[in-house]
Image (cartoon, grey):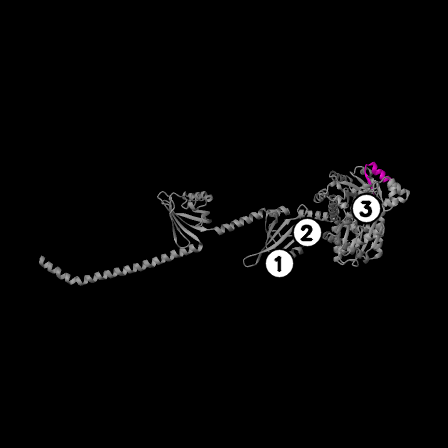
Amino acid sequence: MSAWSSQLQAANWDYWQPYSLSAVLLCAFCALVLAHVSIVKMRRYQAKLEYSEERLRLSLWGSGDELWDWKVSSGELYRSGSWLHPVEAQPNALDFPPNKAQIHPQDLARVTQLLQDHLDGKSSYFEATYRLKTIDNDWTWVLDRGKAVAFEYNGQPSRITGTLKSIQQLKQTEEQLQLFARCLQTISDAVVICDTDFTILEVNPSFSKITGKTRAEALKQRFELSLYPSTFMQDIRRALADTGTWNGEVQEQHPNGNIYHIELTFDQTRDEQGIINQYVAVFSDITERKRKEVELHKLATTDTLTGLPNRSAFMQKLASLVKDTTEHALLVFDLDNFKKINDSLGHELGDNLLCKLSQRLSSYNSYNNKLYRLGGDEFAILLDNTNDLYLITSAAKELLLQINQPLIVNQHELAITSSIGIVLFPDDGKDPQALLRNADTAMYHAKSEGANRYLFFNDSMNKQAVKRLQLENLMRHGLKEDYFSVYYQPKMDIVSGQLVGMEALVRFITPKGGVISPASFIPIAEETGQIIEIGEVVLYKACLAVKNWINQGLFHGRVAVNLSSSQFSLPFLCDLIDDVLQQTELPSYHLELEITEGTVMQSPPKAIEVMKKLRARGIHLAMDDFGTGYSSLAYLKQFPLNTLKIDKAFIDDMNTARGRNMVDTIVTLAHNLSLNVVAEGVEQETQLAILRKLRCDVIQGYYYSKPLSEEDFSKFLQEQKLKHAKLTAVSV
């Protein structure tokens, strides 16, 4: 049985063996097909996954965001860089937050608190903006957002994922906007934003401060200027359309009724398409500035002493008339001998006189709004829209009558006269400077013909004015080229006949024109101020020459040098004289300064102060031309003088008893004041004899010698030395 069974089984195996093999092969094939399908599906899934990951990475790269994944328990932090390369961060597991080392110290506490609040379930997500350290150790602003996605058994988050976005540019823009907002809130200028219909959309606090209107009152109202017609805003709109901006100064009324001034600027703004969408107005309150401008203009155009329009206002008006080619007449006048009034009665009285005269003339209808003070005692009247000679002559005569009426000033009744120069436009000048210059020229000619006159300008006057200008220029050139020389006139002792000193006299000698008379150039030099530089030249040359003569044993007296009024009033006069004496090494007691009577009487207290300083240096002082001015004996005894000089006019008049008595009085007065007396201009022996009888001390004049050049005076000194030696030998 078993053998049969074995045979039967063997027979069955042989029978089924081919079928089994086929089944196995079929199963293997199916498995292979199934595996292939699975592999294809896996590859497709992997490709989709890679595509999805690439799309995510590209999205992150395009947005500039980073993806991060933080395992809270282990502290592992994964960051996916925006450059498509994952970055694995391995922070200290104890750090909290995990990027603690990269967070700005000032932001760390805030970020830590926000992250902890999310971990504690106090917030649905974590969000923080803070500064993060970059690779180059700089700081950049980031927006960090995340959310817990996995939790422990106890509910504590075990995993948080999120994104990190750079907001550096956004933060900078935000800071700029905040800065602009703060500026708009704090600037003193008002800012108004309007739509295209000029309806107000927004204002800043300064708007309310300037206008007195609250923000609520201003919003949704049209921007208007209440003191101007509606066409004014239309003009602004047209200007904005043409140029995009408008600027100007306007007035507006405050709710309390006060008028204020603003400087207003309108500009347009456009959107991205270039379409105008808003107007911005900026204005500042210039009320105070305008008030000060008015005050300054008044100060600049008003004479502070008389209240009349001043020289500046006059020149503006004259220039306006010339520009408009308006026919007009200009009358320039001053007061005759006003300087003598100042010298004798004082500058305060002179100022009061000018004020009273100005009040009288300005109240006269014919001169109302036509009278100007040009400076000093010089005034001007502009008669516009006329060249009528009869009318102008009548105005000039009336002006002289008004000035001639006596004025009571400080209990003094003063009768004054005037000289008037008249020019016509356009005949006598084409510009304001020429008109004024020619009017001055005519006035000076009127004065030279006698007091209380008027003259119209003519060409001959202009020629003289040109000659004067040429002389001014020649003096200026002469100072540079050393054309000014010093001549010396001896001073002789009237008893012994010996030389005791000399006076230094300036001479202007030009290579082409020869000697120019002092009477011609000195008055002009005094007016132009050139006399100061000329006087310094004379002082230096005289001191240097005397020092040389002293060194040669030819001279031991003093040299007298004239001080002009301009020199005497210099604040640094004493320093100037010290410098000259030091440079020339001349001892101060060899110098005598001659000062005219009129100079010291301009301000006697100040003159006394200066004279005392000069005397303290050992310099002798002489009063020149005594008796020709307005000296006060009360001051004369206070002046620290050494010498009085009698003017040549008194010497020439000694042929009369009255003239001799006058000289006798001066000599007696001087001796009673312990002063030496010098008589100048002595030319005749009879004059010398009279002066001897009157006990005059020293004489000077052509009787002994004319003024001599430095070379000729050296010869004169040598002759005097020989004469003295002979007299000494005879007496022995």
Of labels 3 and 1, earlier in sequence is 1
Q: Is residue 191 left or right of residue 97?
A: right
Q: Secondary structure at mark 2?
A: loop
Marks 2 and 3 sit apart, C-alpha to C-alpha, by 52 Å
Q: Nearer the viewer, residue 607 or 250?
A: 607
Instruction: Please give the residue where the numbered disc 2 appears in the rendered image.
Output: 227
Which one is closest to the eye, mark 2 or mark 3?
3
Q: Nearer the viewer, residue 611 or 686?
A: 686
Of labels 2 and 3, earlier in sequence is 2
Q: Say what amino acid the circle numbered 1 marks.
A: Thr
Q: Say what amino acid the circle numbered 2 marks.
A: Leu
Q: Quadrant of residue 678?
A: top right
Instruction: Please give the residue where the numbered disc 1 appears in the rendered image.
Output: 243
> Residue 654, percent across and down?
88, 44
Marks 3 and 1 sit apart, C-alpha to C-alpha, by 61 Å
Residue 317 seen by the camera: no
Q: Secondary structure at mark 1?
A: helix
Highlighted magenta segment, given as a residue range = 664-681
Q: Are marks 2 and 3 in contact (CB under 8 Å)?
A: no
Instruction: Please give the residue where the numbered disc 3 appears in the rendered image.
Output: 338
Magenta span has 675?
Answer: yes
Which one is closest to the eye, mark 3 or mark 1?
3
Q: Residue at x 66, y 48 (%)?
A: 286
> Residue 89, percent across and down?
38, 48
Q: Quadrant of the N terminus?
A: bottom left
> Residue 699, percent across and down?
83, 43
Q: Say what amino acid the circle numbered 3 marks.
A: Phe
> Residue 178, percent across and down?
53, 48
Q: How many marks?
A: 3
